[in-house]
Amino acid sequence: MFRILAVSIRGHRYLEGNPTSHPITEVPPGVGTRFPSLTAVKQHVQREYRSLSVVWRVEVIDERGEVVSRGTRDGVNGTGSRWVWQTT
């Protein structure tokens, strides 16, 4: 199972599905929307983050809170609609 950390243009991290709207510094266990696969994460990001210009990067984390993949917006200053993915 995977979760999404959205990174704003100011560098703040927001956990997808977190009951508060405040940025987080460490990932709380058992909180946030869970996705069954990296493919499901990528589809969700492409669909839901398309119009959010304040999010330029997402980090996919596993159950232990470790980053397993990163997605960065393509285009000038990270403003494109396509995402470039890399595995860590």
Image: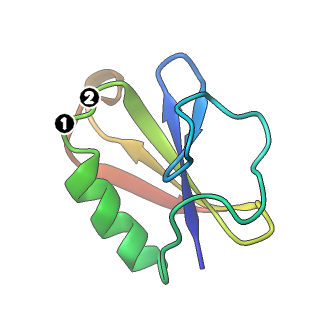
Q: Position of residue 30 (x, y in %)?
A: 72, 66
**Number of numbered labels in the structure image:** 2
Camera-nearest residue between 29 and 3: 29
Residue under pointer 1 = 51
Left or right: residue 71 compared with residue 43: right
Residue 61 badge: none
At x 59% / y 23%, what residue is drawn? 11
Q: Position of residue 77 (x, y in %)?
A: 34, 22
SS class, disc 1: loop
Location of residue 20 with respect to 35 vertically, above or below:
above
Q: Give, as a three-letter code, the residue at label 2.
A: Thr
- Contact, mark 2 vs mark 1 (Cβ under 8 Å): no
Q: Identify the image quadrant of the N terminus.
A: bottom right
Location of residue 2 with respect to 74 vertically, above or below:
below
Q: Position of residue 39 (x, y in %)?
A: 38, 77
Q: Position of residue 80 (x, y in %)?
A: 22, 36
At x 26% / y 28%, what residue is drawn? 79
Q: Identify the image quadrant of the C terminus.
A: bottom right
Left or right: residue 15 compared with residue 51: right
Q: Give, as a three-letter code, the residue at label 1.
A: Ser
Residue under pointer 2 = 79
SS class, disc 2: loop
Location of residue 88 with respect to 84 vertically, above or below:
below
